[in-house]
Structure formats: structure tokens, C-alpha cells
Amino acid sequence: MLEGIRREGKLPEHRAKISETELRLLARWQVEDIKDRRILTLLAVLYAGCLRPSEGTLLRRCNVNLSIDKMVLSIVKDKTNKEGSARKVIVQAAPNRFCAVNLMSIWLQRAPNSPYVFPNLNESSRPMSYAVARQEWIRIASKLDIPSNITLHGLRGGAATQAIADGAPVDEVMRHGRWKRVETLKAYVEASEKTTPVASALLKRMRLGPDMSSHDETGKAKDSVRRRENSN
């Protein structure tokens, strides 16, 4: 599904991707205070928007357009677009408790007054730092028994992997996550029978005759029965 295009230089290395199993844990998590709600909302936005962690922590309120059924984020600058115009990321509402649109709507009503969506709770004129976001994620992951090798970057990778597994075309995933090169996207996508449905099933589609291993075992069983009958 992901065609290889040769590229010079070292490709990025990424750790484990978050999966549906961990997302269910986050969806069931009962937040207790404003810090919990801030990190839960950030996690949902990172996943649904396929964002890099810094794109989430530096997101400004003026770059969020909320409606009942969707949210449009304007990413002003990112890793592959440092000088160009803002890129739009559309996130649709979902019928579950990890819905980024609903969580964002609630968060913006309760968050401190700040130009940033996810402000520093001690000094709201500043954004939440990556270091704090990472610490909060480690705290929540430990509390919910989420594997420690899943980092904040694993949400972006998990989102791309799930989108490919669900049948989204590669070019659509690249647009949503704002990847410029297929090889870079490949570093984020976990290989599985769902993300490589055609290539991983080559022999499954071929007509090569009956399963000889099963046939041999059946034949051996019949011979064994005959020998027992003859001995009696």
C-alpha cells in the first residue's frame, strides 16, 4: 500500500504507536482537575488532527474554528511549512468520549484566559511547554497502565496507522498529517495485515491446490485407524 520512493538521508525513527486499546483507556478515564482535562484534550487533538506535539502545545485560540460537527485547526507553522500560509486540519466530531471536538469545546469554556489553547497554568500568557506535556502524559500513561514506550509522538503515528488500516488512501493521510514524502509517512505507520492487506495475502489469493499439510495429516489418521482395526 505504501509505495517506496528512494530518498537520500536518514529517515526519522519513531517509537510504538498508540492503538485502539489505549484509546479506550483514555476514553474511560475520569478526569479529576483542570490539569487532567488539559492533557486529555491535548491528547485527543494530537490524535484526531494527526498533529506533532509542538503543533498542539503552541496552538492558539484564534486558529481554532469550532462547530457542532467539526473543528478546523489552522497550523500556522510546522516542520515542513515554516514560511508558507497556514494549513487547515479538519477534525470531525465522533460519537465517543474521546471526541476531540467535544473535548475542545468543553476545555475552551473552562481553560484560563489565554491566547493559547493549552496555556501554562501558572502563567497563562505562555503556552504549555513540551516538557510539561510529556510529564503529564507519562503520569497519565502510568496511571492507566499504558505502555511506557508510547510517547506523545506515538499518537500521530497511531492515527496514521489506523487511517491506513481503515482504508484511507495514502495521499489523503499525507494531506491530513501534512507529510510531504511517502517515506516519512512510512516511518509512522505500523506494518500489519490491515496496513498491508494486499501484499501480506499473496499466497492467500493463489489457487495452488489443496492444503497438503492438512491432507497428509488426514491420510495419516486414516492409516492409523486401519492399523488398529486390522490388529483387532
Image (cartoon, rainbow, N blue to C red):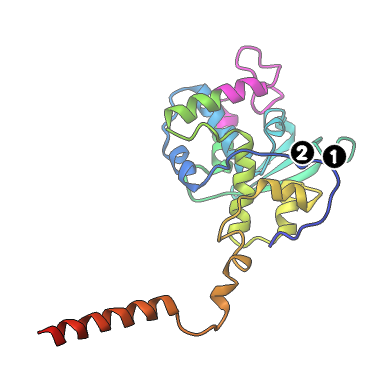
Residue 99 visible in the shown view: yes
- Amino acid at circle 1: Asn
Residue sitting at x 15%, y 85% = 229
Q: Residue furthest left?
A: 232
The percent coordinates of residue 76 (x first, y second) are 81, 36
Residue sitting at x 46%, y 45% = 21
Which residue is labeled 2 in the image? 75
Lower position in the chain sequence, tag 2 or tag 1: 2
Which residue is labeled 1 in the image? 81
The percent coordinates of residue 143 (x first, y second) are 43, 27
Residue 48 visible in the shown view: no
Q: Regarding mark 1 in the picture, which secondary structure is present there?
A: loop
- Amino acid at circle 2: Ile
Q: Are marks 2 and 1 in contact (CB under 8 Å)?
A: yes
Q: Is residue 77 left or right of residue 211?
A: right
For the image, the number of numbered tags is 2
The percent coordinates of residue 133 (x first, y second) are 61, 25
The question of residue 117 being in magenta is answered with yes
Mark 1 packing: few (<14 Cα in 10 Å), some, or many (20+)? Answer: some
> Is label 2 or label 1 in front?
1
Magenta stretch in the rendered image? 107-135
Q: Is residue 81 left or right of residue 112?
A: right
The image quadrant that residue 80 belongs to is: top right
Could you give the CA–CA distance between mark 2 and mark 1, rounded to whole angstroms? Answer: 9 Å
Q: Main secondary structure of the magenta part?
A: loop
The image quadrant that residue 42 belongs to is: top right
Residue sitting at x 61%, y 38% = 15
